[in-house]
């Protein structure tokens, strides 16, 4: 697991808004191991979707670098340099409705990437579409269907099929199961896991659901207002969460069991947005352990060893 | 079970159908539920199970046409709701029964301050002056932990969690006996959801309001409910007390639901998902409505409609296994 | 291989247009509108086969001035003794072709301009939209009158004038539709795959932005017909002796007390055409939305 496919350093994305500069992603450093899954967890507005879009090359970062097998993605300029990388990086979207063109049939949607990258042709290309449909468990009888004729689970399978068509190395999954019903969610999670085992994909799995992230990720990065607050191997993080925000997040999940209910850490207040943040701990206003130092100074990242790091003065 | 006298809400055999150009949509098929004062019922199911329609039918809000609501009894607070005229029904709604919806933004008026909106709800049902109503409204806001200095702000100045708390304040403004909450925390972030749930738990104990909690999240149910009813394809397939359902789920669908959830406290390689998907309510399967997705299904399941079998006192499951029709079959608890 | 071939569903080229057509046939008002407009079109455009422009349409017959409807002149005759029905038919041919041509030109240019503004955004967008705002600030009738007066009142100049005044409106709608379509994740999906701008706009964004526009365009033909009639009514549209509905209204206006049919029949022609196009436009709007299934 020490063979990084992607190495992100000092990654920043700022948006100019009417009231100042929004620090959506504010200086992230991490690596993603080949064939592994990194889970990105956080609440709405923490910058996790922006991060996904940066890695999928849908957004240009304000600063920082994304090294993909030695290729600097942020330095790619024209189409000729971009295209081979776009083939290797794909994205699965959250909303299985808006992520599919309502005027295209299943077949047209899945063949689109093959057309764009001129992968094979004619009957062979069509055969490939059917092959991918089988891989993601879509019955061939839906080949002529439009998205509005299918349910959420099948639509999401089309979105996955489209992402797999080019046989990528790395797939950004942006909340791919949040919009689905529980029983369908389990089907899709199982599918993503099976595909990883079969084809060795590397995933970045963005979600707000800690239970889902625990189930699917090897490593987890917790984000708060554009910053990483904690990162560790999944097992370690859930066994030994160190940041007060991670702890609160974990205790906030309603567990579907009636035994051994834990005492809940209730956070006061709500997420603000990181517009021109002051040099202080961004979590301090909601943190019950916050000291004077936390309000005056921004904490750095402490390495606790074995891949566990945390951004908090208490460590 | 409780005495008939104690029942606040008693619905028997509720059926809702929608007559459309594409055929008859069987949204709710013979749902029976009852609730005592101060009790909380979790109505659990996936999209299209008929949870919301059931709630709307109790409130008399199913649009007709195309909808048609029937039941053999709908008693609320010793009053037969089926006999009410629309104007009388309106008095029950909001006065004795309130409803909270998923999206707080659509239920708040953007052009009125939150205090005005709560005061209006109070004045609709109680004969007090505008000034008195405002004082009450500010008190109500404090009950849902919104500080008085924000009482005269507009909804857009509030965050999602605060808006939902305002909605709860409006719903509770006239001290209803029954609160129907339709996915009240689904649109909120986890930490905010925890705040709202905590608040609802506290208010429920304080005000002794009965709650019907509509949700797809079994975690939320375990936090706040006393009784649980699992819905599938317009039917209640299993019902019982919280302990009965969580410790001893007996219907294959309930087990499938639990097995589908990634559990934060357990490690499994693959989730035991339910195959297939929810049937189209305009074209429901014959026999047991769950049989096409059920791993225990036998040919008899597509021929006979299961009864609501009482497995232990107060615990019901709608499955032929409990009628001895599937010899040798036993529903195993999910792993 | 052969086995899977056997069960594989035939991948029919099931276009949205065939689906739309099926849906439209079930929409009563759309069918009525379509039938009405088809009859009007046929009557007008086949007229060269059964009417002679010189003898049936523009030749005065001083013995039959302002006659009431008779067997020979079904809708009566005008102030120069010409058959009103013939003139309505021939006039419709002129009005409808000019309106269609103007609509086609303004739509094509409006779509291109609107799409460019929406896709490139920023400076290009601002410049295009400010220019459009300037044009839209001038009442379109006034703009057309000015343009036609500067040029000659010929049919082609009419088309130019009407196209120019129609472009900003269409460009604005296209831009708005495009912007909302571009927010969909499927646009991000194809962008992320490395699709070129042309493919993104033409394959993905425009088709989804246009369906609400098509009904608008069809209805705008009705507006253009009214515009030609208006221009002709005030004398700067189609010139005499060529017939035109607005010009006929203008000529008959003097006799409205004694021979009201001189104005009534051309008026009815305008109303029927406009109503048929509006019905058709509304029907198309419902039929072209793939999510509308009834």
Image: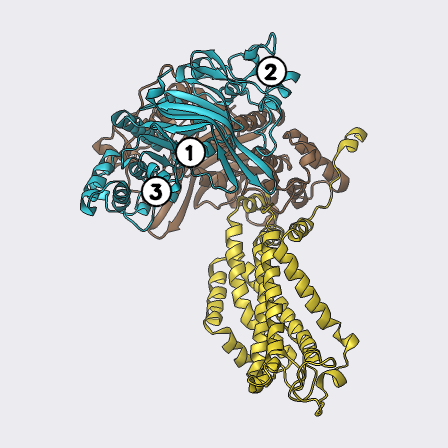
* Left or right: where B232 falls relative to A240: right
Q: What sort of colour scheme is used for the picture?
A: by chain
* Residue B82: mark in rendering: 1
SS under mark 3: loop
Please tell me if label 1 and label 3 are on a single chain: no
**Residue matched to label 2:** B296
Residue neighbourhood size for the residue with mark 3, other residues' Cα within 10 Å, grouped as few (<14), some (14–19), many (≥20): some
Identify whether C12 is placed above or below A223: below
Q: On the rendered image, what quadrant is the N terminus of chain B found in?
A: top left
Say which mark, if any, is on residue A269: none
Chain B: colour as depicted? cyan
| Chain ID of residue with mark 1 | B
Tell me the shade of chain A: brown
- The colour with which the image depicts chain C is yellow
Q: Earlier in the sequence, mark 2 or mark 1?
A: 1
Of the residues tagged 1 and 3, which is closer to the observer? 1
Residue furthest to the front in view is B83
Locate residue C168, reporting x and y percent: 52, 67
Q: Which residue is mark 3?
A: A273
Q: Position of residue C280 (x, y in %)?
A: 62, 60
């Amino acid at each position: 697991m020490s063979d990084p496919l992607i190495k992100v350093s000092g990654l920043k994305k700022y948006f100019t808004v009417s009231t100042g500069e929004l620090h959506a992603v504010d200086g992230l450093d991490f690596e993603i191991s080949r064939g592994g899954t990194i889970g990105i967890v956080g609440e709405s507005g923490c910058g996790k979707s922006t991060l996904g879009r940066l890695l999928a090359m849908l957004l240009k970062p304000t600063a920082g670098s994304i090294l993909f097998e030695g290729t600097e993605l942020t330095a790619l300029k024209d189409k000729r340099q971009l295209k081979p990388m776009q083939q290797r990086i794909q994205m699965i979207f959250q909303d299985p409705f808006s992520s599919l063109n309502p005027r295209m049939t299943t077949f047209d949607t899945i063949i689109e990437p093959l057309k764009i990258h001129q992968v094979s042709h004619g009957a062979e290309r069509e055969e490939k579409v059917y092959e991918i449909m089988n891989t993601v468990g879509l019955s061939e009888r839906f080949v002529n269907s439009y998205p509005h004729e299918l349910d959420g689970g099948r639509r999401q399978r089309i979105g996955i099929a489209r992402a797999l068509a080019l046989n990528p190395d790395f797939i950004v999954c942006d909340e791919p199961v949040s919009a689905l019903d529980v029983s369908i969610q389990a089907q899709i999670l199982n599918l993503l896991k099976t595909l990883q085992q079969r084809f060795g994909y590397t995933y970045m799995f963005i979600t707000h659901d800690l239970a889902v992230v625990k189930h699917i990720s090897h490593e987890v990065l917790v984000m708060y207002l554009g910053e990483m607050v904690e990162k560790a191997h999944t097992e370690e993080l859930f066994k030994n969460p160190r940041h007060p925000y991670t702890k609160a997040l974990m205790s906030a999940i309603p567990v579907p069991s009636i035994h051994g209910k834990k005492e809940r850490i209730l956070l006061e207040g709500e997420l603000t947005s990181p517009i021109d943040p002051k040099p202080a701990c961004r979590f301090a206003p909601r943190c019950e352990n916050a000291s004077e130092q936390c309000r005056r100074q921004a904490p750095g990242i402490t390495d606790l060893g074995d891949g566990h790091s945390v951004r908090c003065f208490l460590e | 079970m409780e005495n008939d006298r104690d029942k606040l809400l008693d619905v028997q055999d509720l059926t809702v159908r929608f007559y459309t150009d594409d055929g008859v949509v069987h949204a709710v098929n013979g749902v029976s539920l009852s609730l005592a004062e101060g009790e909380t019922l979790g109505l659990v199911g996936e999209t299209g199970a008929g949870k919301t329609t059931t709630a709307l039918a109790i409130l008399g809000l199913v649009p007709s046409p195309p909808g048609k609501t029937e039941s053999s009894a709908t008693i609320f607070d010793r009053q037969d709701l089926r006999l009410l005229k629309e104007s009388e029904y309106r008095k029950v709604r909001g006065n004795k029964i309130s409803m909270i919806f998923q999206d707080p933004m659509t239920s708040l008026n953007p052009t009125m301050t939150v205090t005005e909106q709560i005061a209006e709800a109070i004045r609709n049902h109680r004969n007090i002056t505008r000034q008195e109503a405002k004082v009450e409204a500010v008190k109500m806001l404090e009950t849902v932990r919104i500080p008085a200095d924000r009482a005269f702000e507009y909804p857009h100045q509030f965050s999602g969690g605060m808006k939902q708390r305002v909605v709860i304040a409006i719903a509770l403004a006239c001290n209803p006996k029954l609160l129907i909450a339709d996915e009240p925390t689904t649109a909120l972030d986890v930490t905010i959801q925890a705040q709202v749930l905590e608040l609802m738990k506290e208010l429920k104990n304080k005000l002794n309001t009965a709650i019907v909690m509509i949700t797809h999240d079994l975690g939320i149910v375990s936090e706040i409910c006393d009784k649980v009813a699992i819905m599938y394809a317009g039917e209640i397939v299993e019902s019982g007390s919280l302990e009965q359902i969580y410790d001893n789920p007996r219907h294959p669908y309930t087990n499938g639901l639990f097995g589908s959830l990634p559990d934060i406290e357990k490690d499994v390689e693959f989730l035991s998902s339910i195959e297939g998907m929810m049937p189209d309510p305009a074209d429901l399967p014959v026999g047991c409505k769950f049989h096409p997705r059920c791993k225990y299904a036998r040919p008899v399941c597509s021929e006979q409609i299961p009864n609501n079998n009482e497995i232990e006192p107060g615990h019901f499951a709608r499955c032929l296994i409990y009628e001895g029709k599937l010899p040798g079959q036993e529903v195993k608890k999910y792993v | 291989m052969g086995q899977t071939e056997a069960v594989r569903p035939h991948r029919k080229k099931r276009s949205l247009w065939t689906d739309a057509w099926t849906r439209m046939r079930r929409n009563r008002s759309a069918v009525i509108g379509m039938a009405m407009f088809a009859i009007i079109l046929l009557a007008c455009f086949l007229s060269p086969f059964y009417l002679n422009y010189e003898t049936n349409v523009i030749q005065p017959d001083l013995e039959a001035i302002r006659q009431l409807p008779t067997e020979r002149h079904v809708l009566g005759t005008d102030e120069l003794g010409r058959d009103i029905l013939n003139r309505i038919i021939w006039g419709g041919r002129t009005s409808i072709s000019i309106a269609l041509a103007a609509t086609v030109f303004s739509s094509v240019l409006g779509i291109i301009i609107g799409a460019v503004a929406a896709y490139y955004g920023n400076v290009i967008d601002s410049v295009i939209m400010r220019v459009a705002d300037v044009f839209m600030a001038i009442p379109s009738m006034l703009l057309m009158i000015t343009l036609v007066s500067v040029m000659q009142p010929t049919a082609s100049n009419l088309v130019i004038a009407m196209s120019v005044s129609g472009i900003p409106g269409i460009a604005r709608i296209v831009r708005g539709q495009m912007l909302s379509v571009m927010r969909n994740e499927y646009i991000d999906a194809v962008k992320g795959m490395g699709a070129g701008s042309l493919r993104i706009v033409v394959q993905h964004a425009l088709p989804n932005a246009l369906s609400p526009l098509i009904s608008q365009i069809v209805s705008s033909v009705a507006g253009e017909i009214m515009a030609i009639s208006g221009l002709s009514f005030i004398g700067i549209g189609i010139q005499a002796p060529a017939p035109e509905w607005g010009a006929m209204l203008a000529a008959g206006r003097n006799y409205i007390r004694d021979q009201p049919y001189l104005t009534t029949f051309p008026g009815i022609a305008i109303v029927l055409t406009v109503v048929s196009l509006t019905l058709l436009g509304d029907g198309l709007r419902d039929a072209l939305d793939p999510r509308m299934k009834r």
